[in-house]
Image (spheres, rainbow, N blue to C red):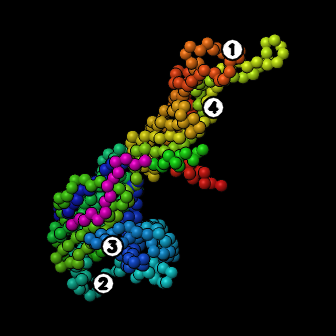
Amino acid sequence: MKRIAVAFAITIAALGAPVRARAADSNNVTIVVAGGHVQACERHFTPPAKPPAQVMILVGQKTADGGFAPAGAPEDLTITAGALSRTLKKGDKELKLDGVPEDAATLTIVGQAGPACDGVALVQPAPSVLHPTAASAAESDNALIMQQARAYYETTADKSTEGGALGRKFKIYHLPDGSLAEPLPSHINEKDRLELIVLGPTDAQVTFEIVTCEAVPGLRILGSYADAAKIGTVPISGLRTVTAELRIVPYVHKQFVQCAGTLVYKVTVKRQGQPDITTTMSVVFDPVYRLAWGAGLVFDFVRPISYSLKPRPAATGTGSETFVAQSRDYGGVRPIILLGLHYCGANPLDWTWCDRIPTPFIAIDPSRIDQGFMVGANFQPFSGVGIVGGLSVYKSEVINSGAMVTPNQVWTAPGDLPKHSEFNSDGIGGFVGIAVTSDVLGKLLSVK
């Protein structure tokens, strides 16, 4: 093994508040669309000896600056790899192929009128060892560099992950051909930071280009009030001995880049006498929510006082009389609409211990919006569903000051009781129940 110094790096970050990253993102095939038709199909990984088990199909358009912007498929497309066949529906922007057969050498993409583009090779042809050529010598050089890069990554590279539920820092390593050294983490979200690193030869020029990186919103809310209210790499044998060294050099760039949605970037490796290698990578970030609308059913233990006029038999034994009745009943089972705070920043696709810490919320009863409110905590063992409890604060009725009215008093005056509602200790109580986020509520209500 030659001495490995190490090769080109960039530090990129995603801060702030789904995102979602996939292991198959290291094996991308992009379908380029233009004018409502498929223009080309491009592979963004070096074909290994065996086809990758997972392939991510991405659909998009070329931008004016040579970048790639996600777009929907212009028609239903049939994606076939060996015996595996899947349909990419019209309008869909991506499709993950899982379980690609080991005998699948080519990926075909067929539309309604026939093949939408040339087949995409999934495996690398075996090199010729009988007739060495300049090309095969270059392949041998590249193979040695790839072996050294792989060995460095597996034995020396710092692959540690820093941070936790409030945000992590991942080191994402690329091999000299631009492919990922290992699959991306299963989930990356907007709180996480990415440090992109390329292991490349010392005689290569490595460049990065950030094609797409949306700004992370300062505050993202899950659901809506309206929805809540419905409750109503392989080594290749070489032909010659070559000397190749690797190095890592920091790439001067902004230390952090905030991204939401999909991060698309290009890695280009240029070497004298070798064809340029350009790899386009994409990382989908899970959105992170700080606030969430929800709805639930609770039992309200508050017992506000209310006054009314009711009839009863007269004390004389004949006829009836009207008296002042006082009641103090439990609020009972009530619907609530709540707005909760996720201080850790919640990713519904990757629920963590921090998300299971009870979160504060404020709520109202839609049947008595002008009478009071509730505050409490929501314990959510799973995304979208929680056990709630807290304090109810509602108005209670009182007799107007100066009115000589007492409970059970016979009422003979015309009109209603001189009373009004106000917040006092009689209208304070507790509640307990269950709640769901408004998106879950919508799904439940749609089930027939």
Query: Which secondary structure dominates the residues rendered in magenta?
Result: strand
Quadrant containing the C terminus is bottom right
Q: Please say whether residue 393 is visible from this viewpoint.
A: yes
Distance from the alpha carbon under mark 2 to that under mark 1: 108 Å
Quarter where residue 243 is shown = bottom left
In this rendered view, identify the residue nearer to me: 406 or 341. Answer: 406
Secondary structure type for disc 1: loop
User: Residue 401 bears which disc, if any?
Assistant: none
The x, y position of residue 224, in whole percent, is: 48, 48
Magenta region: 207-221
Residue at (37%, 47%) from the top-left corner? 219
- Disc 2 vs disc 1: Cβ atoms closer than 8 Å? no
Q: Position of residue 284 (x, y in %)?
A: 38, 59
> What crowding class fits label 2: few (fewer than 14 Cα within 10 Å), some (14-19), or many (20 or more)?
few
User: Is 299 above or below relative to 181?
Assistant: above
Question: Mark 1 is on which residue type?
Answer: Gln
Number of the label disc, if any, that sits on residue 128 = 2
- Residue 244 higher or lower than 395, as above or below: below
Give me the residue at 23% from left, 65% from top: 208
Amino acid type, label 2: Ser
Does residue 121 appear anywhere in the picture? no
Q: CA distance from mark 4 to mark 3?
A: 59 Å
**Image check: 248 left or right of 97?**
left
Upstream in sequence: badge 3 or badge 2: 3
Frontmost of labels 3 and 1 is 1
Q: Which residue is mark 1?
A: 409
> Mark 4 Cα within 10 Å, few/some/many (few <14, many 20+)?
few
Camera-nearest label, 2 or 4 = 4
Q: Residue at image x 56%, y 33%?
A: 432
Give the residue type that dot 4 points to. Gly
C-alpha gap between disc 3 and disc 1: 83 Å
